[in-house]
Amino acid sequence: MQQNSSKQNNNLAIVAYLTLFGTLIAFFMNRDVRNPLVSFHVRQALGLWLLQLLLGYFIGGFNSWMVTISFWVFFIVLFLYGIFGALAGKMNEVPVLGSFFQKLFASIGE
């Protein structure tokens, strides 16, 4: 039973990174039985998605493929880092921004 619950928590942590809707699904499914791993990854994913949407709006104003490609590579690497951490069942903060997201969204998952 414990292993099944652990696998479900890992799956919810991974779902949080798939889309913004995946983050919301993981958040609401984690509300009844709070799991620290899922809450951690929901905070990380929510921060990444919101920052990507906010910065993407402004990056779209640049008419440079180098700026756009750099933006996308940066966020793809951060999302992959978060997904691989969720796969391993670890609570590794995404580089550069992870601790900020944990502080900003501290009320999520408490």
Image (cartoon, helix red, strand yellow):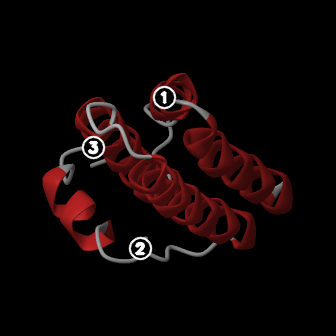
In the foreground, 40 or 67: 67
Image point (41%, 73%), residue name: 93
Q: Residues within 10 Å of mark 1 (few under 14, many from 20)?
A: some
Label 2, label 1: how many angstroms apart (C-alpha)?
18 Å
Q: Secondary structure at mark 3?
A: loop
Mark earlier in primary sequence (3, 1): 1
Mark closest to the chain's N terminus, 2 or 1:
1
Callout 3 crowding tier (Cα within 10 Å): few <14, some 14–19, many ≥20: few
Identify the amino acid type marked 1.
Answer: Leu
CA gap between label 3 and label 1 equals 15 Å
Q: Secondary structure at mark 1?
A: helix
Element carrying mark 2:
loop
Residue type at mark 2 is: Glu
Q: Which residue is mark 1?
A: 20
Task: Say which residue appears at 28% left-offset and 29% top-offset.
Answer: 57
x%, y% of residue 63? 35, 37
Q: Amino acid at mark 3?
A: Ile
| 6 relative position to 90: left or right | right
Numbered tag placed on residue 93 in the rendering: 2
Could you tell which of marks 3 and 2 lies nearer the N-terminus? Answer: 2
- Residue 106 badge: none
